[in-house]
Image: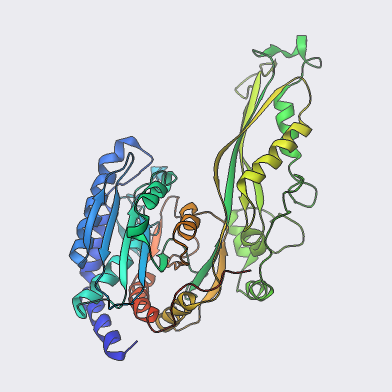
Amino acid sequence: MSADVVSDLDRFFNANSGRIRDELFQLLRIASVSTRPEHAPDVARAAEWLAGSLRTAGMSVEVHATAGHPIVLGEWRGAPAGAPTVLVYGHYDVQPAEPLGEWDSPPFEPSVRKGRVYARGATDDKGQLFIHVKAIEAWLRTRGALPVNVVFLVEGEEETGSEHLVPFLRQHVERLRCDAVVVSDSAMFAPGLPALLTSLRGMAYFRIAVAGPDTDLHSGSYGGAVVNPVTVLARILASLHDEDGRVAVAGFYDRCREWPAELRQQVAGLPFDEDAFRDEAAVPELGGEAGYSTLERLWMRPACDVHGIIGGYTGAGTKTVLPARASASLSCRLVADQDPAEIDRLFRAHVQRVAPPGVRVRLDLVHASPAWQARLEGPLLAAARRALAATFEREPVLVGEGASIPVIGDFDRIFGAPVLLLGFGLPGENAHGPNEWLDLGNFERGLRTVARLWAELVAGDFPLTGPRSP
């Protein structure tokens, strides 16, 4: 990337820093909570606001209605012949702000304290998405063109499961076909230490219901002779793990892809403070599958967790009933090559084996998405490394993520394009909790990193698709 381009872009960001921040705050003030019907007008307003911002940046924009919330599609396709096309994905919807009483400032009125902006959506994902909008504007205002074609695809349903996004992708597959996908909806490893995200765990989310008698029964009259659904549910849930913290469902680990040895070695060398992680979780000790470190458990290994249990009487006083039914929700975080449909079959077989006669047990797979693993070599990752190293003056590390972003795998499967997860958040930013924040220094460095990335993409080899990781 030439010094003249760097200088022009840097002057633009310096001269417009206040305006860019003010515009970000405008977006953060919109309560685009996609999970709440009463906020549907706010979600629509956020879509229109973003569309206007993309037009101001110099892109052609369409707002597509869906049966849910709108999808914003922006395009700039004026790059030289043969240049790659990059699809930028993000979301403008946010989580509910409750509990409101735990916020130190109103969640939809941005507040700057000690170099951080506090607001719902600051890091997830409005702040990180807006970095890309302004990086495009910087190029078009200073150079009149971009070195690559860019397509923005921004949805308003990420926080509710992206129900209408995949049908939109399939409907517009030729129009959206691209050489790479870039997403900023993740975090750096630590302050000052940039990271490239190489994996996301998948998910299989279940609800289990145990039914016994038609109604609650007097435990004195029936206890000991009628099978208790709450006891059965407890037995099933307790059977899911062995004493070493491994999932005890037969076949569960058969298809787990092992991480490359060099990547495991790099993870082992990361400056991870296990005591600080334990303190952040506010627990006396950490646990999990024996034989693995905490980061390996979070990034490389699958897991199973119970999220909630309902059954019987827990109110004041005493009520000696034998409950008629009990239920629970649980999920498995999956790693590469584990098939959610197969996990569903394995769990059904396990529950049938454990459940005794005298009750009816139902297991429903509510939501499923496969894991994703990046292509660990190739021009796309190399370009991102160069851009981050130049901006942060430090080589980025490769990290994993224990959570799921289901649409990432869909991009890979539908377009066959590599996906780059380039995050500028930080651990502890409370993305779904009270006092969500974004480091404004990282926001500024993010602007320069993304602007540099577009030039770095044409400095390497083509095509951008490198080999898939083994």
Vertical arrangement, residue 393 with respect to residue 44, above or below:
below
Q: Is residue 79 visible?
A: yes
Q: Residue at x 39, y 59 (%)?
A: 123
Label tally: 0
- In the rendered image, residue 56, in percent from the top left (x then y), is placed at 18, 64
- In the rendered image, residue 352, in percent from the top left (x then y), is placed at 74, 32
Q: How is the image coloured?
A: rainbow
Which quarter of the figure is the N terminus placed in? bottom left
Q: Residue furthest bottom?
A: 3
Which quarter of the figure is the C terminus placed in? bottom right
Q: Is residue 48 left or right of residue 246?
A: left
Res 336 quadrant in image: bottom right
Q: Is residue 1 left or right of residue 226?
A: left
Q: Nearer the viewer, residue 115 or 91?
A: 91
Q: Is residue 117 visible?
A: no
- In the rendered image, residue 413, in percent from the top left (x then y), is placed at 49, 57
Q: Residue at x 59, y 45 (%)?
A: 204
- In the rendered image, residue 268, in percent from the top left (x then y), is placed at 66, 72
Res 295 quadrant in image: bottom right
